[in-house]
Image: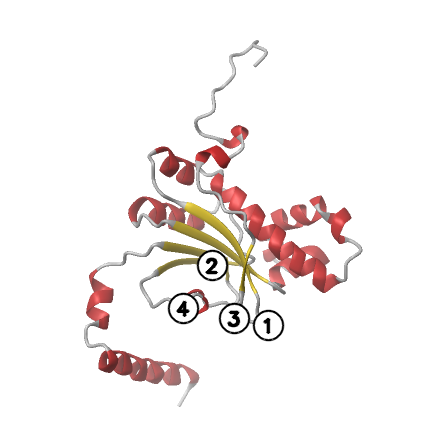
Amino acid sequence: MSNIEKLLEQNKVWAKSMTERDPDFFKRLSDQQNPDYLWIGCSDSRVPANQIIDLPPGEVFVHRNVANLIHYNDMNALSVIQYAVDVLKVEHIMIVGHYGCGGVRAAITGGDNGMVDYWLHSLRELYNLHHAELKDLPLDEQVDRMCELNARSQVQNLARTKILQRAWERGQNLQIHGWVYGLSDGRVNNLECTISGLSQVPNLYRVDRLTPVAGSNE
């Protein structure tokens, strides 16, 4: 049996066991998805969203990419976010990094990593911004600290998008959280950097800010 055949066989066993435990499981799942959570995480195979927070299929809308980054020109991520916010009406968005992230390590150690170097450019700039406070730490500690700084930065980036700000303007209950997951113990570190409204966004990035009149002193 090939690896792919084995996966397909495992799928049959899983589907059968789920139906035996709960005959209506797949019917409920196919009727409608109505999650309260959007998980934006790293593509790392060791960080499965549903399992980490112990929620069944259908409860978490998920987007993943290398190093859990929010780029303003990433139509894939922005489309996922807009659908989650405007259609699914999620109430919580978790941006979740993980300690020991290979993408973070690649960004701060340099070298030629191919196409991913373009993707990681903003992360490298973030490292440069904090280099003075990190440079004397051992590399592993630098990586882990950058995983936290990165998650915090992406929370800020997401709050500065029109998607989130328009939702807050219309009174939608929506919070963005920054987390980092520990591969060694399975625990999530809440970075306590939650943003829950337009008032927490710097004025320069707000969609409702007043544009100064040319020639004025404001």
Mark sitting earlier along the chain (2/3): 3
Expressed as whole percent of the image width and height from the top left, the position of residue 84 reads: 35, 50
Using residue 195 as the reference point, say whether residue 112 is left or right of it.
right
- Find numbered disc 2 in the image and state the secondary structure of the residue it sits on: strand
Residue 61 location (% of width, % of height): 37, 58
Whichever of callouts 4 and 2 sits on the residue coming sooner in the sequence is 4
Q: Are the residues flagged by discs 4 and 2 in contact, CB closer than 8 Å?
A: no
Q: Tell me how far mark 2 sits from mark 3, CA to CA.
A: 12 Å
The reply to whether callout 4 and callout 3 are in contact (CB within 8 Å) is: no
Residue picked out by circle 1: 184
- Labels 2, 3: front one: 3
CA–CA distance between discs 4 and 2?
Answer: 18 Å
- Alpha-carbon distance for marks 3 and 1? 11 Å
Q: Amino acid at mark 1?
A: Ser
Closer to the camera, 120 or 182?
A: 182
Give, as a three-letter code, the residue at label 3: Arg
Looking at the image, is mark 4 or mark 1 earlier in the sequence? 4
Local packing at callout 4 (Cα closer than 10 Å; few below 14, some 14-19, many 20+) is few
Whole-Å distance between the Cαs marked 4 and 1? 17 Å
Q: Can the viewer see residue 200 in this picture?
A: yes
